[in-house]
Image (cartoon, coloured by chain):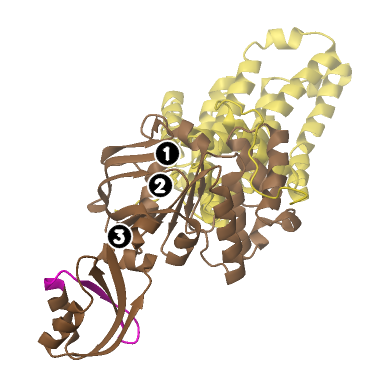
Amino acid sequence: MNSPVVLEHVTVNYGAHQALRDVSVAFPEGAVGLLGPNGAGKSTLIKALLGLLRPASGAMHILGHDVSEAPLAIRARVGYMPENDAHIPGMNAVSFVAYCGELCGLPQADAMQRAHEVLFYVGLGEARYRNVETYSTGMKQRIKLAQALVHDPDLLLLDEPTNGMDPKGRDEMLALIRDIAGPISVILSSHVLPDVEFACDHVVVLHKGVVATQGPIAALKGDSARVFELRIKGDETRFVEALREVGIESHGEADEMMRVFVPADRPARLLFEVAARQGVQVRHFRASVPSLEDVFARALGD
Amino acid sequence: MPIHDQGYRRYAGERMTRHRRWLVIARAGIVQRLRERRFLALMLMAWLLFLVRAVQVYFGTTFARASFFAPSDETFHSFLNQQRLFVFFITIYAGAGLIASDRQANALQLYLSKPITRHDYIAGKLATLATFLIAVTWVPAMTLLALQVLFSGSLDFVSSHPRLVPAITMTSLLQVALASMTMLALSSLSRSRRFAAMLYAVVAIFAGAVERVLQTATGAAGWVLLSPQNTLVVVTDALFGIESDTEIPVVVALIAVIALLAICVGILERRVRAVDVVA
């Protein structure tokens, strides 16, 4: 499989702080979720890919180009939707998007035509003559997507695209991303797990500047472990420690519920044996379906 | 089966090469500004003095009795000096928000995520402001000269004043470069166009006032270097071959102007970035 984005031993520093540490990862084609808690290094990775931040070491290749050697050639083929509000002041939506198209090399007339097309596509057709400053948060997210799409990139970098959107708008945005992810490779950076699970096939989980786990979501969710919901009465800390000693991972949830991951080669009754040894009562036990949240929690070791 | 495919459609048209993308920025900036009536009014006002001078040139070259109106080097020198007022207002109006507003709207990361460099961006913004400033300095001054040729019906005046065209051009360029670069640098320091405008007013007016007070109090001519505008006047006086009021050598004044331009370039180099890294 071709990898539109490849990182080899990339380290990015902010002064003394290492935002990315020796990251080596290859993003496959299609939609890839870039997951991680706040401060994990997701936005830093995206900015480094665009050549906006210079890595202290390592190499990055996008669509066959070396980022350090051909950042402009890369930016001509990449669309970037930043995390925070961003627009060109004093322009209406269609002028703004057409302007972005021209900056990417589209002729003036083509840029204007394409701007109208893209604005209809993202659902801003009726509001395209309004000044961007008057837009709601959801509309600002859509216009950021439009400016990233106007020059028809081969790779789209989306940084928290559903931030601040209402549920309907969020669903529509995710549907757009799914549609785009056919012809265009998409890297979707988010800490909203259901968004990534809905829109992406693959996931790369970053934690504290390193890749915690990566792979197809389906494989990661079903990788040789069964998931159970468990509620106990007794010393939870000791119980979790005892589970870990026998190779069973767990992480806490709301209402004193915990999710435990029993490896395929271990019987589920092992949970009850450990509970009996530790003198805790099992008050609730139910088989569950592995979710991306489990993948995330296990990758982060919570 | 859908009647019309509403899915994502790819672009199959042509793409231009990278060079001259700064022109896109400059054109957008100029068009955006020209849509404002207040700015158009300001630009028209900046040409009022030209009309007065044009009438002066007409009478001076057409009627022998009005020969005291006849243009000279001093006519063009004083015209460009008088235009400094409009250079000041246009610089503030059209320049204060050039980078400050982009910083406020987080537009820098949008610009620099496109296939343009920081230098393209700065060149585009600089060209936006410089275009308007050239339109109220070099263009009217050269038009005045053209009118003189037209009214007199000969090139005698131009050939007898060989330094006039280079002097007008150099004076205009220095005025435009100093005003544009200073304003852009100050605009890049803030996210507020008002604050950037205030900073420029301080540099242009307050520094001049302080310089006058200190020069009067101490009698030392060197204080003129405090004011970029007055330092520039020393250089432009020399370009027109007119004796300057101050005793500062032209070379020193020129070095001061170049140093200020270098400082502005340094500020822009540091401040125009897509990502502010606070280490």
* Label pair 1/2, CB-CB below 8 angstroms: no
Q: How many marks?
A: 3
Q: Where is residue A195 drawn, in percent x and y? A: 48, 63
Say which residue appears at 35% left-offset and 56% top-offset.
A219
Circle 3: is it few (<14), some (14-19), or many (20+) Cα within 10 Å? few
Query: CA gap, disc 1 to disc 3?
Result: 26 Å
Say which residue appears at 77% left-offset and 8% top-offset.
B155
Q: Where is residue B146 drawn, in percent x and y? A: 77, 18
User: Disc 2 vs disc 3: which is toward the camera?
Assistant: 3
Q: Is residue B107 left or right of residue A283?
A: right
Q: What element carries label 1?
A: loop
Tell me the magenta residue range. A244-257
Q: In this view, does A8 lie to the left or right of A133?
A: left
Residue B137 versus residue A133 in the image, above or below? above
Foreground: B244 or B135? Answer: B135
Chain for disc number 2:
A
Give chain A's shade. brown
User: Disc 1 vs disc 3: which is toward the camera?
Assistant: 3
Q: Where is residue A287 drawn, in percent x and y? A: 34, 77
Amino acid type, label 1: Pro
Query: CA gap, disc 1 to disc 2?
Result: 16 Å
Q: Name the residue under label 3.
A: A223
* Label pair 1/3, CB-CB below 8 angstroms: no
Circle 2: is it few (<14), some (14-19), or many (20+) Cα within 10 Å? many
Residue A47 numbered mark, or none: 2
Chain for disc number 3:
A
Do the residues at discs 1 and 3 belong to one chain? Answer: yes
* Chain painted in yellow in the figure: B
